[in-house]
Image: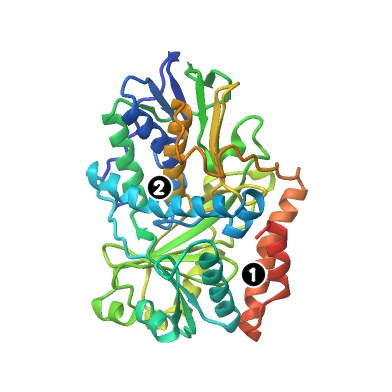
Amino acid sequence: MSSVDDELAPRPALDGDRIADVVIIGAGYTGLWTAYYLARADPSLQIVVLEKKIAGYGASGRNGGWCSALLPSSPSALARRHGRDAAIAMQHAMYATVDEVGRVAADEGIDCHWSHGGTVTLARTPAQLLRAEAAVAETHAYGGTDADLALLDADTAAGRCAADGVLGGTYTPHCAAIHPARLVRGLARAAQRRGVTIHEQTPVLAYGPGLARTPTGTVRAPVVVRATEGYTASLPGAGRAVAPVYSLMIVTEPLPDEVWQRIGLAQRETFSDFRHLIIYGQRTADGRLAFGGRGAPYHFRSRVRPEFDRDPRVFSSLRRTLGELFPVLGDDVAVARTWGGPLGVTRDWTASVGLDHDTGLAWAGGYVGDGVGTANLAGRTLADLILGAESELTGLPWVGHRSPRWEPEPLRWLGVNASLRMMTAADEAEARTGRPSRRAALLGRLIGH
């Protein structure tokens, strides 16, 4: 946390009962963007945010730093549920969201190391190259062009990110590299400047229509927003709403210029490849490689504990994978820090946002690790819903969507961890043969992609 421009001193906890217009549970991106846009639209509103730890403690403060236009649901999956036009509208809204986050960061003086360099996703096996081609074809089938997602040949892809064994890839400009903790802490300060009250170290024990109850008081408000993402299962009655799945990260010491000249990422492009078990990385503003991925197990009964943030086996695997991608790193480049945390996965891998006007209960989440940008769109959409404003945002297909609940244990534990193992096995098989894995096709059917 040494690179965060903030003392990280907790704000005062709630001390007694309060009355508000809106109470928000969770001071991550979703909760803070919602508070920010509400306060900007109507400065007279009394908005209270309740946070168990400190603002940005969860995934908002320790993610991979991709402010992207990615959605957990593919355009095809959205089109099957809502129609082609709705899928196109949703994707265009996400494209615009990347620019919106950058604009607000600049307007509010949030130094989040913003660099709008786009994303290069590499294909390093023939099977991955087929998926790159399919991704571009799907984007173009739903209104996109090469300006949104372009197929790259081997030389062009390696010119952006010179990983080992590159056969091709894709490039999209719709992503910016950021410092996630700087963004979320700066957003908290911006919301406070507009009159939002943030109570940290204030866990919510229970919530329902009109109230959120904590150990030190109850906040009563006609609108209660659940913005807890990977921590949702800890709330009473929400244990099967979202499965917390861990993603872990490492970051190197600063790399010398001659190493960066060989790796590339000259525009601070974020990078990944087309394997099944997700990896992601970026070149930080101070010249480090920050690199993360899935692979940590799902924990029985959706448990979230600090000790789960660190898994030496996964950290070792990430360092090994980073060395395979960039042999120039050798064994000499040290890992400076390691960390991790839970992200939120819904049963149908679909993010949603909504407001029940009968109860006043609102929610947003289920970003499956793509929440930096998506949470901004969610916050703007929730603000319009709460204020009763009909807009292009309130007409998007994720508004009001209800994901099915996860299976009860032990089926949830068996299913999620089996999926993780299946992705790992598919990647290993494709690395050996270069051909698409049957396991991957089965997995795609299971998760609705």
Viewer-side residue, 295 vs 268: 268
Viewer-side residue, 176 vs 9: 176
Quickly name the residue at label 2: 61
Q: Quadrant of the C terminus?
A: bottom right
Q: Secondary structure at mark 2?
A: helix
Amino acid at pointer 1? Thr
Above or below, 74 relative to 156: above
Q: Quadrant of residue 38?
A: top left
Residue 31 in picture, x, y percent from top left = 44, 35
Residue at x 44%, y 83% (from the top left corner) = 153
Badge number at residue 424: 1
Residue 293 in picture, x, y percent from top left = 51, 63
Amino acid at pointer 2? Gly
Q: Secondary structure at mark 1?
A: helix
Viewer-side residue, 176 vs 74: 74
Residue 70 in picture, x, y percent from top left = 48, 57
Whether residue 51 is visible, yes or no, is no
Residue at x 47%, y 81% (from the top left corner) = 168
